[in-house]
Image (cartoon, rainbow, N blue to C red):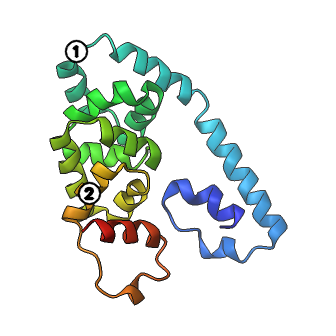
């Protein structure tokens, strides 16, 4: 992946075609500019996430969860979860509405999501996996690469994979798909 694509990947917006045609030196300038803008606009976020994570330890879940869902964007909730760590975040993950947790999960790296799913109540983890398989297959396959066997078996039970290997030879998730097939 080019530096330009890496720098813009966090947006989930395709790189504008005009930027692809720039000379390499100008692409590097765009990348440097994008990084500077992001760094400036997100300065202090990590400390904010840390502070919120420490504060909510002392507020009952039945108060935090509705406020979070109503007033906190999923990207911010994910930042707080990352700062809380897996153990504390698991308690919230079990209680969050499925659709909201799905949105939050897209802002958490796949390794941490796999750890969260492993520690969540089985029923909630299975509901999440099933929901993601229906709505965000690529996302759950990214997470599946890090799942322990017990959770990977849940994925294998619910996923429908293409029958022909030709469809998957160049698929970026080819290895995990093969593991899932072996469990089916």
**Residue sticking out furthest to the right:** 25
Q: Where is residue 85 in the image (x, y as percent from the top left)?
A: 43, 28
What is the secondary structure assignment of the residue under circle 2?
helix
Q: Nearer the viewer, residue 172 or 39?
A: 172
> Mark 2 — residue?
153
Q: In which quarter of the image is the C terminus?
A: bottom left
Q: Residues within 10 Å of mark 2 (few under 14, many from 20)?
A: some
Q: In this view, does 166 lie above or below 171?
A: below
Q: In this view, does 71 lie above or below 60?
A: below
**Residue sticking out furthest to the front:** 182
Is residue 14 among the parts visible in the rendering?
yes
The image quarter containing residue 120 is top left
| Residue appearing at x 26%, y 43% in the figure | 100
| Residue appearing at x 68%, y 47% in the figure | 35
What is the secondary structure assignment of the residue under circle 1?
loop
> Mark 1 — residue?
60
Q: How crowded is mark 1: few (under 14 residues within 10 Å), some or many (20 or more)?
A: few
């Amino acid at each position: 992946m080019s530096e330009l694509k890496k720098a813009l990947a966090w947006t989930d917006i395709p790189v504008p075609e005009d930027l692809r045609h720039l000379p390499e030196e100008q692409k590097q300038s765009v990348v440097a500019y994008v990084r500077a803008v992001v760094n400036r606009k997100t300065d202090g976020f990590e400390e904010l996430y840390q502070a919120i994570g420490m504060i909510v330890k002392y507020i009952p879940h039945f108060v935090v969860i509705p406020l979070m869902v109503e007033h906190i964007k999923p990207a911010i909730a994910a930042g707080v979860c990352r700062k809380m760590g897996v153990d504390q975040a698991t308690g919230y993950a079990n209680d969050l509405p499925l659709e909201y947790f799905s949105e939050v999960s897209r802002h958490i790296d796949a390794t941490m999501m796999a750890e969260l799913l492993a520690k969540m109540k089985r029923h909630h983890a299975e509901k999440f996996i099933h929901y993601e398989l229906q709505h965000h297959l690529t996302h759950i396959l990214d997470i599946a690469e890090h799942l322990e066997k017990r959770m990977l078996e849940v994925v294998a039970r619910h996923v429908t994979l293409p029958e022909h290997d030709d469809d998957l030879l160049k698929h970026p998730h080819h290895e995990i798909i093969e593991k899932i097939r072996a469990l089916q």
